[in-house]
């Protein structure tokens, strides 16, 4: 699998020995776990105040053989009336609550349809409320054995506990949570010996004794949700600039640990320079037993096959680390659209290409435009401010691609120095708080000394993309110089643009910007040498809908087609047809009818995007479709199965 295929399918603290002695409990009686307290260590949020978040003290026992989780959550609610006396928590229907208490007294509760309702009673005004919830549950989401379609990056797995591995995603409601409220956590995880657990926060204990492996994690910064992974990992640690770097790999991938640790250190140094201090005490690269590419607070969870891909260290790993600043450090304001994926794509995937060479950066931006043009046909678009998360190729083309290009265009408007200064200011002012597109517009405006508000309001609030063309282009010799004139045309929806043009000559090229906010704008430019070509947006600095002639046949052309015709060439092997059906399913086209070449004609394929399985034998297909394809449809062929 190459990188593009993969993308289309995404102050350390030393271990404290004395704390470990305080936390040891009997592994024979779960009741012992239920009475354990972390009271010896005061949480970082303990100072009173209206901004104090709720705090979870989670005690977990994982039983991989029977998919069972036993847990106690001691939830401390800040002294705010909005949290009590009537408390409503989300908790999976798979969980069974055995008791709810406060101050040693049982509290009435009900648990129906994933909602745990608790009457906490009344207490002293301004006092915090501590509620203890004991529960257990089984989680058996089945990971795919041979996944082909990756439009759902979770593969339908929200939580699963098994001998092969354990994943508890923050959306699975595996612990009692206050919906929409950020919380801090301290988590103690007990599992059979050899099962190492990883979650958010700093690891303050890790030990194996009495047939059990125990770890304790302290997440002092507020989180939007908590995920946890565990498995028979080989753990490798390294401290770099007071940050604990870790790999938690299965034995087969453990030889890659040193390369990953080296790369994490490089990325942290890069982003500290560009964005400001790394906001967490650790970063762990953790292996999952089914394909994932998740970025969580202070760790990333990558599938076994993903970790082994040779390009991941230089590409997707950095993307997940960049999420430590964007999305997991500075939160997305849910009311203002998800900017995080677009910005992370821009400061990671695009930045790596741009740093390699200007040509590679240009090619990456061109790929964004091609994907958007193919996957988001006119009429199926939506404004970037409505993007919440990826649900398929079209939403990815908008929420990742278009949003990344918005940041690129903002950088062209502000200049490099102001752009990176604006990003650092967002990090400085909004870390562990929500940020919206408006916050970015404000910081870019301050850094650049110009109002960027209208730019962002237009680009995130308007659906679609400008379609641009040149017309009435003339060249005239005037003495020893040449005069080139013409018009730039824009089809609706109209955007306010500064369109780059480049006149290529035998000497130095001449660049100009054409301002337009409607359907047409004229331009005139003079060159000392005779012009040889005029190019619109030569460096691909504008987000726009491409002309069909700018798009070669690609896999995404198949994924985005709404009029696909699949033709099976004469002599194509039956076994290969079955393989082709799997390929079509992976591209979201599993229901497409296969046509036989001998029962089809070139005329019947007019106006369709055509995929040939094998090479057609008749010239009637080859001449009109391959040699001179009309710009209204594309043609691809696959001969790999012969």
Image (spheres, grey):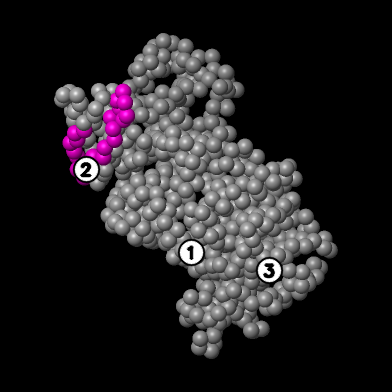
Observer-nearest residue: 594 or 321?
A: 321
Q: Image quarter for residue 467?
A: top left
Q: Distance between the Cα atoms at labels 1 and 3?
A: 28 Å
**Which residue sits furthest front?**
480
**Mark 1 crowd level (few <14, some 14–19, many ≥20, 10 Å Cα):** some
Classify mark 3: helix, strand or loop.
strand
- Mostly what secondary structure, the magenta segment? strand
N-term-proximal mark, 2 vs 3: 3
Relative to residue 280, is residue 154 depicted above or below?
Answer: above
**Would you say residue 602 sits in the magenta stretch?**
no
In percent of the image, x 72 and y 45: which residue is there? 254
Query: Mark 3 highlights which residue?
Result: 59
Q: Distance between the Cα atoms at labels 1 and 2?
A: 37 Å
Query: Mark 2 highlights which residue?
Result: 516
Q: Are marks 2 and 3 in contact (CB under 8 Å)?
A: no
- Would you say 635 lies left or right of 530 here? right
Relative to residue 267, is residue 336 depicted above or below?
Answer: below
**Which residue sits furthest bottom?**
124
Query: Mark 1 highlights which residue?
Result: 431
The residue segment tinted magenta is 503-525
**Would you say residue 507 sits in the magenta stretch?**
yes
In percent of the image, x 60 and y 43: which residue is there? 313
Q: Image quarter for residue 183?
A: bottom right
Residue 51 x, y percent position in the rendering: 48, 75
N-term-proximal mark, 1 vs 3: 3
- Would you say 531 lies left or right of 101 here? left
């Amino acid at each position: 699998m190459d990188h593009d295929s993969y993308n289309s399918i995404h102050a350390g603290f030393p271990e404290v020995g004395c704390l470990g002695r305080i936390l040891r409990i009997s592994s024979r009686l779960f009741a012992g776990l239920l009475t354990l307290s972390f009271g010896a260590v005061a949480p970082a949020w303990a100072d009173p105040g209206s901004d104090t978040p709720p705090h979870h003290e989670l005690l977990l026992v994982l039983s991989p053989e029977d998919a069972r989780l036993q847990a106690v959550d001691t939830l401390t609610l800040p002294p705010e009336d909005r949290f009590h006396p009537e408390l409503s928590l989300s908790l999976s229907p798979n969980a069974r609550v055995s008791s709810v208490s406060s101050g040693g007294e049982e509290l009435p509760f009900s648990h129906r349809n994933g909602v745990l309702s608790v009457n906490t009673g009344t207490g002293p005004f301004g006092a915090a409320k501590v509620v203890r919830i004991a529960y257990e549950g089984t989680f058996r989401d089945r990971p795919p054995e041979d996944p082909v379609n990756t439009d759902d990056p979770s593969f339908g797995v929200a939580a699963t506990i098994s001998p092969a591995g354990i994943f508890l995603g923050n959306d699975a409601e595996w612990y009692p949570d206050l919906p929409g409220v950020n919380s801090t956590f301290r988590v103690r995880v007990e599992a059979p010996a050899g099962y190492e657990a990883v979650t958010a926060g700093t690891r303050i204990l890790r030990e194996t004794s009495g047939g059990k492996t125990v770890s304790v994690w302290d997440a002092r910064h507020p989180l939007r949700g908590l995920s946890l992974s565990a498995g028979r990992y080989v753990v490798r640690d390294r401290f770099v600039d007071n940050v604990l770097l870790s790999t938690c790999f299965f034995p087969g991938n453990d030889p890659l640990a040193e390369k990953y640790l080296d790369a994490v250190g490089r990325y942290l140094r890069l982003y500290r320079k560009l964005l400001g201090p790394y906001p967490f005490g650790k970063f762990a690269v953790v292996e999952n037993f089914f394909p994932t590419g998740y970025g969580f607070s202070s760790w990333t969870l990558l599938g076994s096959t993903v970790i082994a891909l040779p390009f991941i260290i230089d590409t997707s790993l950095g993307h997940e680390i960049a999420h430590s600043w964007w999305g997991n450090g500075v939160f997305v304001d849910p009311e203002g659209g998800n900017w995080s994926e677009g910005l992370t794509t821009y400061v990671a995937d695009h930045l790596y290409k741009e740093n390699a060479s200007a040509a590679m950066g240009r090619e990456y931006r061109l790929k964004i435009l091609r994907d958007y043009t193919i996957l988001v046909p006119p009429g199926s678009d939506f404004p970037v401010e409505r993007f919440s998360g990826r649900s398929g190729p079209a939403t990815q083309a908008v929420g990742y691609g278009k949003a990344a290009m918005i940041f690129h265009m903002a950088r062209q408007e502000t200049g490099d120095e102001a752009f990176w200064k604006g990003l650092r200011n967002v990090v400085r002012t909004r870390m562990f708080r929500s940020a919206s597109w408006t916050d970015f517009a404000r910081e870019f405006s301050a850094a650049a000394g110009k109002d960027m508000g209208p730019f962002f309001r237009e680009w995130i609030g308007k659906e679609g993309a400008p379609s641009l063309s040149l017309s009435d282009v003339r060249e005239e010799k005037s003495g020893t110089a040449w005069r080139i004139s013409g018009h730039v045309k824009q089809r609706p929806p109209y955007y306010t643009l500064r369109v780059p043009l480049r006149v290529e000559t035998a000497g130095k090229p001449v660049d100009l910007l054409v301002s337009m906010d409607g359907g047409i704008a004229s331009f005139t430019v003079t060159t000392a040498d005779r012009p040889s070509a005029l190019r619109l947006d030569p460096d691909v600095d504008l987000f726009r809908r491409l002309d069909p002639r700018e798009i070669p046949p690609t896999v995404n052309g198949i994924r985005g087609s709404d009029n696909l015709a699949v033709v099976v060439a004469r002599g194509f092997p039956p076994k290969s047809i079955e393989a082709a059906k799997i390929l079509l399913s992976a591209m979201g086209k599993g229901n497409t009818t296969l046509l036989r070449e001998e029962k089809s004609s070139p005329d019947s394929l007019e106006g369709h995007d055509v995929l040939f399985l094998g090479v057609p034998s008749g010239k009637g297909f080859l001449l009109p479709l391959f040699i001179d394809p009309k710009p209204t449809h594309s043609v691809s062929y696959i001969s790999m199965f012969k």
